[in-house]
Amino acid sequence: MGYSGNTSANASPPSVLSPTSSSSPPSSPPPPPVVLSPCAACKILRRRCVDKCVLAPYFPPTDPLKFTIAHRVFGASNIIKMLQELPEEQRADAVNSMVYEANARLRDPVYGCAGAICHLQKQINELQAELAKAQAEIMNMQCQNSNLFELICKQMSAKNEDENLQPFRDNPAFLLDESVLGVAWEPLWA
């Protein structure tokens, strides 16, 4: 709430300054920006935010709810201890995990994340059973379709065969006649 003394319209916001990285090696990630206003954790804890505050890079002053949720479940000292024990590249993931776990614990005080995991596993099992049922129905329909196609083909071939023999049945010239053969038929037994 203090007056910064900077009235220029083009000046950067007073809360964040980016450090120069001319002396750092190119392979290391850039360090987090230096924060001039206290981080959300220090604001909530009502303490002075020091330059090397462990919580500042992960709990920015613009998102106080993030720290509040984690603080309710884990406590500030435990959060600081966990972050100090981890290498810096894993700390952001750890903070996100703590906030997620704290949210789950606040929603479901008995089971927390385990309750969410069990619920998701139950959904997976139900969906897998539904998928297997749908696949069985598809297989059944494919078999029915194949059988129907085979039956139609047999009927069409029988119909074509009948149509091909029809001229011979209707034409009297193709009937066996003694005058056509020139031979008199004799009975087999006399």
Image (cartoon, helix red, strand yellow):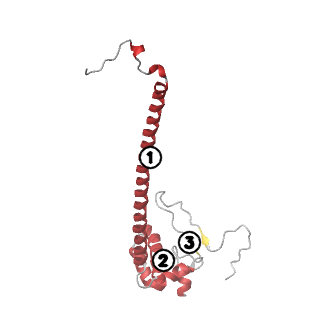
**Residue 159 screen position, x and y as percent:** 47, 35
Q: Quadrant of residue 87?
A: bottom left
- Residue at the location (53% across, 78% down)? 66
Q: Disc 1 marks which amino acid? A: Leu
What residue sits 58% from the left and 67% below the top?
18
**Residue 139 appears in view:** yes
- Which label lies toward us, 3 or 2? 2
Q: Which residue is mark 1?
A: 148
Sequence-wise first label, 1 or 3: 3
| Residue 15 relative to residue 25: left or right | right
Kindly identify which residue carries mark 3.
34
Nearest the camera: 180 or 110?
Answer: 180
Q: Nearer the viewer, residue 173 or 42?
A: 173
- Tell me which label, 3 or 2, sits earlier in the chain: 3
Q: Residue at x 55, y 80 (%)?
A: 65
Q: As rendered, which of 124 and 177 lies closer to the eye?
A: 177
Residue designated by label 2? 99
How many marks do you count on the picture?
Answer: 3
CA separation in Å, label 1 and label 3: 74 Å
Question: In 3D space, how far apart are the residues under numbered discs 3 and 2 (Cα atoms)?
Answer: 23 Å
